[in-house]
Amino acid sequence: MGANETRLKLREDLLVEEVSGDWIVFDLEGGHYMGLNETGWLLWQRLQHGPAKVKELGAVLLAEYEIEPDQAVGDAREFADHLVEANLASWVEAE
């Protein structure tokens, strides 16, 4: 599936906790966890509002950081791919 036709959707059964100023996502079913840096947490917050296209996540980064649009989309794509590989999110068809 390509990022142009699909949206990234977080799993609904994940636990997120703040630990010493960092955010940790716990996958209790899979028995593993992943830490989020400031940028990851920013994108995670957007995804908590519902599925998003990679370009929408890139727009979140552009609004927060002084970076080029291509870098924002690339960074958002890398984050999305990492979440999917970790089984914390999946691609769903855009409505």
Image: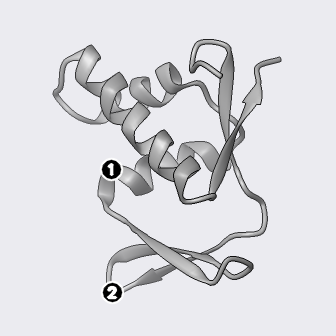
Query: How far across and down, in percent of the image, does residue 56 sit?
Result: 52, 23
User: 10 Å neighbourhood of mark 1: few (<14), some, or many (≥20)?
Assistant: some
Instruction: Tell me the element at label 2.
Output: loop
Query: How far across and down, in percent of the image, does residue 9 sit?
Result: 69, 42
Colour pattern? one colour
Residue 8 in which image quadrant = top right
Instruction: Tell me the element at label 1.
Output: helix
Q: Which residue is mark 1?
A: 39
Q: Write the residue at 33% across / 87% down.
A: 20
**Residue at the far right in the pictured view:** 95
Query: How far across and down, in percent of the image, does residue 64 sit?
Result: 29, 36
Residue 32 in which image quadrant = bottom right
* In-image side of 21 versus 3 (left or right): left
Q: Is residue 70 above or below residue 78?
A: above
Residue 70 in which image quadrant = top left
Q: Write the residue at 40% across / 26% down.
A: 58
Q: Which mark is residue 20?
A: 2
Q: Is residue 60 above or below residue 5?
A: below
CB-based contact (under 8 Å), mark 2 and mark 1: no
Q: Quadrant of the N terminus?
A: top right
Q: Nearer the viewer, residue 28 or 65?
A: 28
User: 10 Å neighbourhood of mark 2: few (<14), some, or many (≥20)?
Assistant: few
Q: Amino acid at mark 2?
A: Ser
Query: How far across and down, in percent of the image, does residue 94 sit?
Result: 76, 19
Q: Which mark is residue 73?
A: none
Q: Earlier in the sequence, mark 2 or mark 1?
A: 2
Q: CA distance from mark 2 to mark 1?
A: 16 Å
- For the image shown, how many numbered marks are present on the structure? 2
Q: Nearer the viewer, residue 18 or 73?
A: 73
Q: Write the residue at 42% across / 32% down.
A: 77
Q: Quadrant of the C terminus?
A: top right
